[in-house]
Amino acid sequence: MSTTNAAVPTVKLFIDGKPVESTSSEWREVINPATQEVLARVPFATRDEVERAVASAKAAFKTWKKTPIGARARIFLKYQQLIRENMKELAAILTAEQGKTLPDAEGDVFRGLEVVEHAAAIGNLQLGELANNVAGGVDTFTLLQPLGVCAGITPFNFPAMIPLWMFPMAIATGNTFVLKPSEQDPMVTMRLVELAHEAGIPPGVLNVIHGGPDVVNAICDHPDIKAVSFVGSTRVGTHVYNRASLAGKRVQCMMGAKNHAVILPDANKEQTLNAIAGAAFGAAGQRCMAVSVAILVGEANEWIPDLVAKARTLKVSGGTEANTDVGPLVSCAALDRVSGLIERGIQEGAKLELDGRNPQVAGYEKGNFVAPTLFSGVTAQMSIYREEIFGPVLCVVSVKTLDEAIELINANPNGNGTAIFTRSGAAARHFKEEIDVGQVGVNVPIPVPVPLFSFTGSRGSKLGDLGPYGKQVVQFYTQTKTVTERWFDENEVGGAVNTTIHLK
Ligand code: NAD
């Protein structure tokens, strides 16, 4: 927690269409992870501030739910334009507070922008169905009606994309929203919220409160919040799922991962090495879809030196430096955690082929850097295999057959993403059929689907049934109501009493 420092700007809450200075006595510093410069102070909202945000969203719902679908869509058309126009500024804020490189920060914003574009198509997505003459003169149709106040809780690693997974689709479907961004990097999220209001989101429809466990628990328990979307670690996601479900809410939690890439010896070698290095070490490994385990099958095991050589070519530096591949980890705590896990890997007998600890990064001596690190000889019992490292550390596991690789992946509790690299259509088809993971790449290392589809992590990486964007999210944020109706002709002769369950 920080002490008061008037020179450092404060991150505002956003309630009723306006930035609000918190009266909280509890604050935390937002720190540039490449330099340790304090960028801002973020408040942990008080109970009263949470109440005000929810009350504002509840009041706004009364009119927002009746706003014509075309009017809602046009706000998101304008919003996507504003995000494009401000892309460079958004990326610069994101890099300063989170650490990822500027091109990757633009990618973070862009993947969220795609969901905003999707929200602008809400007219085609929130359509009901109608069956004519389900009985004589009787029709049945469905309405997809908004739920009310919905809430989102987001992680540090995609502070633009993940808030944009949530509030645009919730609001486009007619709900109002309370967002709790990551307290580690809330500044780009706040800029996106300001732009949403500039695009025409009415006061109260989108509110932001900052904080930690107390604020999250208040969201889970609040009787006026109808649905909660969470993205973050498995530990916190499981807690949020249980607590909010118990309070009667609709909940979806997208959580931790351990993503395996399987490399067959017939794969295109150069393309595969590039893909694995990018997916393992890009964003300093702080992606839920990062490849953290490479399973080399048969003769592909001879590629370990090539993989190490490829990892050595990546440039480690501040995210604003040209040609940087690997920026810093988000915090000193993350640096300690990742360094500790590398040490455990050595102690537990894995072979450290490339040690990225304590790299010398000119001009960024105080940054939280770990350079690409690679272990071979990793087994399923080791901590570096069992835990989500969330750093630029690749674990190489050696197996003899594709079926052995499939068995290993299916035995892992996580099911966020996986990929296979091969030139064999038959091997890829076998993999797609047999693998028990929600998102599969074939010669594509990070298979996050575009918003025409939904994000479909599975098993231990997901709680709740429906994904955070795509078609599934329209169901998540709406209640399907069926209406069965009959109209009598004034001149119709009255029928008999019907005591059966059948419509006639
Ligand atoms: P985190 O779970 O620590 O934090 C997520 C949110 O929960 C934050 O807003 C935080 O303030 C809040 N929180 C933290 N501790 C809490 C507690 N004890 N009680 C209640 N709320 C609490 O996650 P993180 O470190 O910000 O993000 C990294 C994690 O997110 C990784 O595990 C990563 O795999 C996961 N992630 C998953 C996806 C996905 O789609 N499956 C996407 C991105 C990140």
Image (cartoon, rainbow, N blue to C red):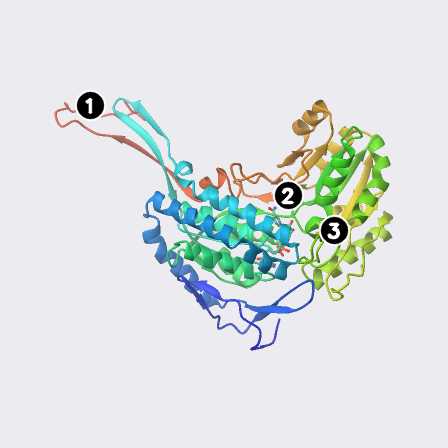
Which numbered tag is attached to residue 460? 2
Residue at the spot of label 1: 496
Which amino acid, by three-letter code, is at mark 1?
A: Ala
Which amino acid, by three-letter code, is at mark 2?
A: Gly
Q: CA distance from mark 1 to mark 2?
A: 56 Å
Q: Is residue 46 left or right of residue 340?
A: left
How many neighbours does mark 3 have within 10 angstroms: few (below 14), some (14-19), or many (20 or more)? many
Mark 1 near ligand 1 (CB under 8 Å)? no
Q: CA distance from mark 3 to mark 1?
A: 75 Å
Name the front one of labels 3 and 1: 3
Marks counted in the figure total 3
Q: Which badge, 1 or 2, is on the more N-terminal residue?
A: 2
Residue that appears at 77% across and 63% down? 362
Question: Which residue, as the protein is rendered here, is positioned at the far front?
Answer: 322
Whether 317 is drawn above or below 396: the answer is: below
Name the front one of labels 1 and 2: 2
Q: CA distance from mark 2 to mark 3?
A: 22 Å
Which numbered tag is attached to residue 392? 3
